[in-house]
Amino acid sequence: MRAAAIDCGTNSLRLLIADVEDGQVRDVVRTMRVVRLGEGVDVTGRLAPEALERAWAGVQDYADQIKAAGVQAVRMVATSASRDAENADEFVAGVVARLGQPPEVISGAEEAHLSFVGARCVLDIPGTVAVVDIGGGSTEFVVGSEDVDAALSVDVGCVRMTERHLRSDPPAATEIAAATHDIDAGIARAQDATHFAGADHLIGLAGSVTTVAALAMGLPEYDSRVIHGSRIAAQDVHRVTHDLLAATRDERAAEPGMHPGRADVIAGGALILDRIVASGGFGEVVVSEHDILDGIVLGLGASTR
């Protein structure tokens, strides 16, 4: 069957249209756009009018693509920013007007489960894995082998850390220290709940991780085929993070393969990844281009059998 998944996070709006058969996912369309829905939510508690307009424009575009592709089942999920916002109902109404159905504002626990299923379906890695999905407003930690054993979502994300702490260009040492303190506190909560540091392998998801991987490998341009399944050594994660924190936004934006909507928050995302790798004592991170979107379409495929 042909299914579509839309994931609206704090920073990006992403679409996967795929054919699902026998637990396998074949991409038809996989795309993303930065809408920064969560802009300012950490301070105001509300979704900004400009952010809503950006998100709604993206939803309309995706709705048109879904219709043209002959999709049989659609599910849209909205994550951290929508959970946090006082005016989430306004966002929902705008989505219904364009997509014909509301987004599901899912819990952090379900977000973590879907990310785990999506990453695990395409990576054949033995033993216990810790999957970390570094988003704009939150990071999901999931531990398991064939299924989820433990999961926790913590309010530490690349947009949230940038808006809260990393405001200078480039960030000042005091700002980096404050962000690190918040990140380490979130990691400690995740370790208490999931014991992720005891996993055999670390799998990293989402744009911050894949961008760090592209920079670590020195790719001349962003190439998802090369990035997916790559293994980035801990020292390379740390090196890239150090360089990103020392660079200005313009310097980050000039890096090959850097999405223009990610340059201002990538340093925060890299810092989160670096602290997770170090705290867990992992020698490397395995990078996955498959994530919550794959988990959603697999669920749609299973539910229609």
Image: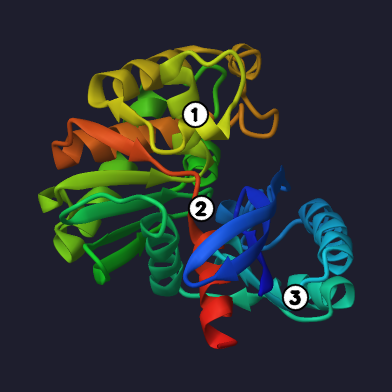
| Residue 254 position within the rendered picture, expressed as x and y whole percent measured from the top left | 65, 13
Q: Residue at x 55, y 29 (%)?
A: 167
Residue type beneath disc 3: Val
The quadrant the N terminus occupies is bottom right
Q: Amino acid at mark 2?
A: Gly
Could you tell me residue 215's position as x and y percent? 48, 19
Q: Is residue 172 visible?
A: no
Q: Secondary structure at mark 3?
A: helix
Between disc 1 and disc 2, the foreground one is: 1
| Distance from Cα at disc 3 to Cα at disc 2 | 19 Å
Residue 259 at x, y percent in the picture: 66, 29
Q: Secondary structure at mark 1?
A: helix
* Total count of labels: 3
Q: Which comes before the other along the chain, label 1 or label 2?
A: 2
Q: Residues within 10 Å of mark 1 (few under 14, many from 20)?
A: few
The residue beneath circle 2 is: 137
**Amino acid on which disc 1 is placed:** Val
The numbered mark, 3 or 1, whose residue comes first in the sequence reads: 3
The disc at residue 92 is 3
Which quarter of the figure is the C terminus placed in? bottom right
Dots 3 and 1: beta carbons under 8 Å? no
List the residue tagged with mark 1: 226
Position of residue 287 relative to residue 39, above or below, is above
